[in-house]
Amino acid sequence: MPIPEDVTGDEIDKDVRQELQSLPKTLAEDVAKNLVMVARLIDEDPEGAYGYSRVALRLASRVAAVREAAGFAAYANQKYSEALAEFRAARRMTGTVDLWPMMADCERGLGRPEKALDMAGTPEVHKLDKAGQVEMRLVAAGARRDMGQLDAAIVTLQSPELASHSVQPWTARLRYAYADALLAVGRENEAREWFAKAVEADRDGSTDASDRLAELDGVEFVDALDEDDDVADVEAEDKGTVEADADAEDASDAEVVADAKDEAVAEDEAAGAHEADDEADDEAEAESESAGEREKSGDSDGSPVQDGKA
């Protein structure tokens, strides 16, 4: 797949760059560039990110960072079985438990929430850092909801991290999940309160908490672009109507002119017919007069001859 010219491969994390040092230099550079493209596209273009991850995987399947990137790309495309396999491979290579929550969520994606709950109760969870433990709690609550255990999902999310007033990278998502769980059981007022708290913590727009809050408040957003499109459609329709009216008026004028021309032609033809009749009458009258004169002239000249013959 093509790599943009502005991608050098130096953009990757230093830990990943260190892993790639086991590869030949040229190969390491190619892998690094593909990993950069995975990270660049995974949110906006998951399919594109997945394509670059497959290239990196073909080039360096024995590098843990490559397997991890391939797992995240597959996860973003809802290829949960493939993602789980890549996460497991990366875990075997590194021996860490950082991907444990992601592996559990893949089990949910595969329709096995019970398996995800089992993973939430294993010793590996205690080895996770605070962010990983919060992520595991979110996965476990989601698994409870998958199984129809809505109240249990609420209890699962109740924790010191949820009650804390400090804002951490996970705070917005945790508050959002709690608000959504409350809303699922009809506790709308409490849900609104926690959606509002999620908005306060959501500094990078990682959730749609503001939209959910507005929905509860009965606020309806109008897309400015859609509104502009509607105005443009109305203007186009009005323009079309005006042009149609103008065309109709022009056609009407053309018909009037044509009728006038036809009438003038008819009048000219009628006048020509009258003139032709008059000319014919004149010619007939003139011929009659000429015949009379010839007759008179014949009488005057013929009498002496006739008399002489007599």
Image: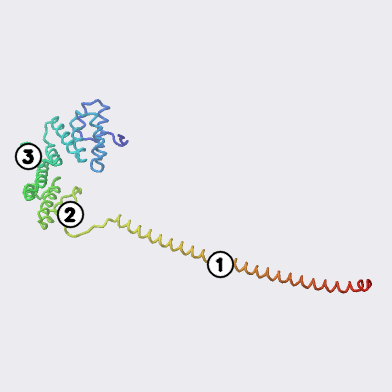
**Residue closest to the far front:** 310
Find numbered disc 2 in the image and state the secondary structure of the residue it sits on.
helix
Cα gap from disc 3 to disc 1, whole angstroms: 94 Å
Q: Which residue is mark 1?
A: 260
From the viewer's side, name the closer residue of 91 and 282: 282
Q: Residues within 10 Å of mark 2 (few under 14, many from 20)?
A: many
Give percent across and percent down for residue 162.
9, 49
Single out the mark in the foreground, 2 or 1.
1
Find numbered disc 1 in the image and state the secondary structure of the residue it sits on.
helix
Q: Which residue is mark 2?
A: 212
Indicate whether 30 appears above or below 170. Answer: above
Give percent across and percent down for residue 20.
21, 29
Single out the mark in the foreground, 3 or 1.
1
Q: Quadrant of residue 267?
A: bottom right
Q: Which residue is mark 3?
A: 118
- Residue under the image location 26 percent in, 26 percent down: 25
Q: Residues within 10 Å of mark 1 (few under 14, many from 20)?
A: few
Task: Please state if 103 lies on the left or on the right of 28 as rendered.
Answer: left
| Three-letter amino acid code of the residue under disc 1 | Ala
Q: Quadrant of residue 30?
A: top left
